[in-house]
Every structure is written in C-alpha cells, then in structure tokens.
Image: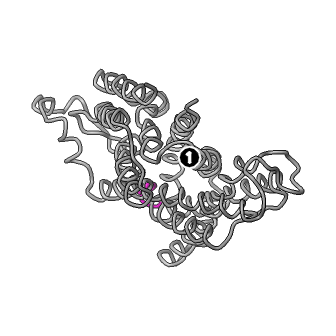
Amino acid sequence: MLIGETIALFVAVSWTATALFAEVASKRMGSLPLNTIRMTMSLLLLAATLWLTMGVPWPRYADGGTWGWLALSGVVGYVIGDYCLMQGYILIGSRIGQLFMTLSAPTAAITGYLLLGEQMHWLAILGMVVTLSGIAMSILSGERRVENGEQANAATTSPLSALRSPLSAHLSLPPRGIFFASMAGICQGFGLVLSKIGLERYDAAIAAAGLSGDAVAEGAAVSLPLFLSVPFAATMIRASIGLVGFFVLLAVFNRDWKERLSHAVHDRKAMWCLLGATVFGPFIGVSASLLATQYTSTGIAQTLFALTPVLIIAPAALLFHQRVTLREVVGAVVSVVGVCLFFI
C-alpha cells in the first residue's frame, strides 16, 4: 500500500485550502502579525492534541537531539520559509506564489540525497519531472497576472500583448515577489529533510524509553499509537521555534508591534481566514507532511505536495474570479499523469 503517497496527496489538498485562506489574511494584517498569531493558534491546537494522545501537552519522550534537528527545521521551514511565503502572497498572490513552491521538490530530493543518502527509482524521477512540468504549464501564461492587486483593463490592452512569450508574465513580476516565493520553496524542501532527521531521532528516543511505535502513551485519554502522535509532537517543536522567531522579527522590525497585533486580532474576517489557514496548515497539513515522509522518500513526498498549484486553480477561479485557460487545464492533466507514474 502506498501509504506515504496517499498522505502526501491529502497534504496537497490541505495546503490548497491554507494558501487560499492565507492570501486573504496576509493582505489584511501583514506577514509577521499573521505568522505570530498563526503559530500561537497552532500551538494551542497541538497542545490539546498531545494532551489527549500523549497524556501531556508537550512533546513527550523527545530528547535533546530530537529538539535540535526539529528546531533547526522550524527555523528554516517556518521562520524563514513561511515569512517568505506570506510576503510572496502579498506581492504576487497565492496562485503564482505556489508556482515557486515547486522548487521544494528538487530541493528535498537533492538535500535528501546529500544528508540521508536517499535514492529514487527512475520512474519516480520521471514522475517528478512530468509533475513539475505540468504544474508549471498550468499556471504560466502569456498574460500579465493581476493577483498582486493590479487592475487589468482589457479595453486598453495592446494587441501585441497577446503575442508575448509565456515567460513574459514572470519577467513582469516584482523581483521581491520572485525572491520571497523562491526562498519559500527552497526552505520548505530543506526544512522537510531536516524534519525527517528529527523524526528519526524521535523514534530512537521512544525506543530508548522502552516503547514501540505501536504503543500508547501512559495517561493518554485517546488510545492513539505513538507513531501517529509523534508527527503532531514534532510539529509542536517546530511551531514553538516558529513562534519565538516570528515574535522576535515582529518586535525588531515594528516598533508599533502591539498596535499591529491588536489591529489584526480585531479584524474579524482576517481572523476567520487565519483560523482556516492554521487548521489546514501547521496543525493538519504540516503534521500529515511529516507523517508522509515516514512512509516515502522526501523527494516523492515533496513532488506530490507540489500538486497544490494545480489544485488551487478551480477554487481560486471561483473565489477570486480568476480566468482559467486551456493551458492551465492541460497542465493539470499532465500533472496527474506525472502522479500516476508514482503508482506504477
């Protein structure tokens, strides 16, 4: 059974919802306030989950090595990666921003090869190439995007604009937006590999405590095997570091950080969107992504996670009134073909 691949596909759906919620919230409250509040929300949800499944509201059995690797993953994946991602959403929108998240797959594959010695079958490598090609095809077009808040005027558009190269849309994107979105994709892939190392250390720490992954923690209210609880515990370690990092950045770069947080909290629409981004992101999505890496290689997992830019096409068109082109539909089909190669 392809358990890891199935979980990875679920993660892609979860992150699609996260991207849609996060774009709305980030444009209303800003990147740093959003991430600070989001990490706080996720820690509360994770603490409640661990209290039920591990008997205590903190990562039980985690040793120093576990904390070290997962903390490093939190700095790379959350503090740097999520900050860049939300800045990218603000500057170029979630739909285009997700294009650059495909950089996470080759980053994870290369990092997994260097740090973990992971190897992939040639069909998996071909599947990665085909999937990434389809994703790129589905969200690249010859027209200038308006997801960064600009208004398009079709009546005054020059006829020559229709003849531009498919890559011209990206040449016209804000350089800062390209930089932040690219860094977000790279950090996600690198952070996932660091998380996998941390999870391996966590499993070793549990074994050192005389327990197996199928065991249930003493005092747990819900009889959930440890191997299902550990991803939530690992996410809590990463989120704890993320909260500290975002709070420091917020306080350093904003003298009026208290007012910014107060304004964000009192924005009801932004807070509801932020809650959705939190539930589907750091709580469910990230925890499931860590679980997926336990059952498949990081390169394959990241490639399936990268389906988010395809999955986001339909809801973005409905919610943000974006036009879907034939090129985007063909790209989605190509991506599905690439995913099928993983199941051969």
Q: Residue at x 57, y 47 (%)?
A: 294
Question: Which quarter of the rendering shows the N terminus?
Answer: top right
Residue 36 lies in what quarter of the image? bottom right
In the rendered image, residue 84 lying in the magenta stretch gets the answer yes
In the image, taking residue 215 as reference, residue 311 lies left or right, namely: left
Question: Which quarter of the rendering shows the C terminus?
Answer: top left
Q: Nearer the viewer, residue 77 or 90?
A: 77
Number of numbered discs present? Answer: 1
Up-down relation of residue 251 to residue 44 (above or below): below
Return the x and y of residue 166 as percentages of the image width and height.
19, 35
Q: Nearer the viewer, residue 304 or 179?
A: 304
In the image, taking residue 271 as reference, residue 174 lies left or right, namely: left
Magenta span covers which residues? 83-87
Q: Nearer the viewer, residue 209 or 290?
A: 209
In the rendered image, residue 254 lying in the magenta stretch gets the answer no
Return the x and y of residue 63 as percentages of the image width and height.
68, 70
In the image, taking residue 247 as reference, residue 321 lies left or right, namely: left
Return the x and y of residue 74 as percentages of the image width and height.
54, 64
Most common SS among magenta residues: helix
Coloration mode: one colour
Q: Nearer the viewer, residue 47 or 95?
A: 47
* Three-letter amino acid code at the position of disc 1: Ser
Question: Which residue position is annotated with label 1?
Answer: 289
Q: Residue at x 47, y 64 (%)?
A: 76
Return the x and y of residue 39 as percentages of the image width and height.
62, 60
10 Å crowding of disc 1: few (<14), some (14-19), many (20+):
many
Up-down relation of residue 129 to residue 207 (above or below): above
